[in-house]
Amino acid sequence: MTASDRMPDRTATGGHMLVEHRVVFSIGSNLGDRLDNIQEAVDALFDAPGLNYVAFSPVYETAPYAPPGETIPEQGDFLNIVLVADTRLPPENLLERVLNIETSMRRERQVRWGPRTLDIDIVVFGDISSDDPDLTLPHPRAHERAFVLVPWADIEPDVLLPGHGRVGDLAQAKQAEGGPSACRRREDLALQQPA
């Protein structure tokens, strides 16, 4: 079953109706022990209540990314995954959790498109659209990024990325472009599901 065919689950809590949303995270690292950084991030996301694990993708390796015309500082390749979960948390609470995890793992934001111990993006949050600069939903550059689309297509190829089309088709087109942005699946690396 994909996010597009799921009916929202409404549960009465404290007099309020809470809707369960499918949330998609993109997680990457290119500093230190990259795989361990991603595993720590996955575990930390589920350490507090409010997220229900659905799936994560295989691990992929990609060159650093920047939009056309932007300069990429010299740095190593990223390991990337996509993680899918269900939540009744508001987007702002989930963003706060993500930022706290990045901070705890020494994520520094000194150089645009620079190397990172950890980078966690909220790609989609159910069918919510937002132009808030702190959390734009869906992520405004997800459709350009092979390191988001290709792992996501391993989990939910038939889901629609609003305004852009089916994730599986977008991933196939992005991989066909090749070049430095292509994703390489790392069959030798694996993550543990959160407890």
Image: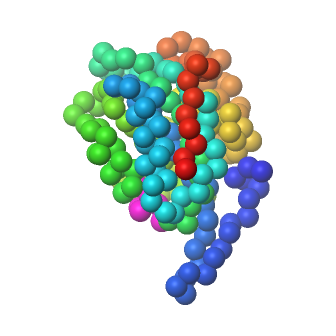
**Closest to the observer: 191 or 177?**
191
Q: Position of residue 43 (x, y in %)?
A: 47, 46
Is 117 positioned to the left or the right of 129 in the image? Answer: left
Residue 84 visible to an observer of this rendering: yes
Q: Position of residue 115 (x, y in %)?
A: 32, 26
Q: Which residues are magenta?
A: 90-95
Q: Give me the residue at 68% from left, 69% from top.
A: 9
For this view, does 34 lie left or right of residue 170? left
Q: Residue at x 29, y 31 (%)?
A: 112
Q: Is residue 162 magenta?
A: no
Q: Position of residue 142 (x, y in %)?
A: 53, 38
What secondary structure do most residues of the magenta stretch adopt? helix
Res. 67 visible in picture: no
Residue situated in front as seen by the camera: 41 or 131: 41
Q: Decide if residue 104 is on the left or right side of residue 39.
A: left
Extreme residue toward the top, this view: 179
- Up/down of 79 relative to 164, above or below: above
Which residue occupies 49% across, 63% down?
A: 49
Q: Measuring 41% from the left and 61% from the top, which residue is drawn there? A: 92
- Outermost residue toward the front? 195
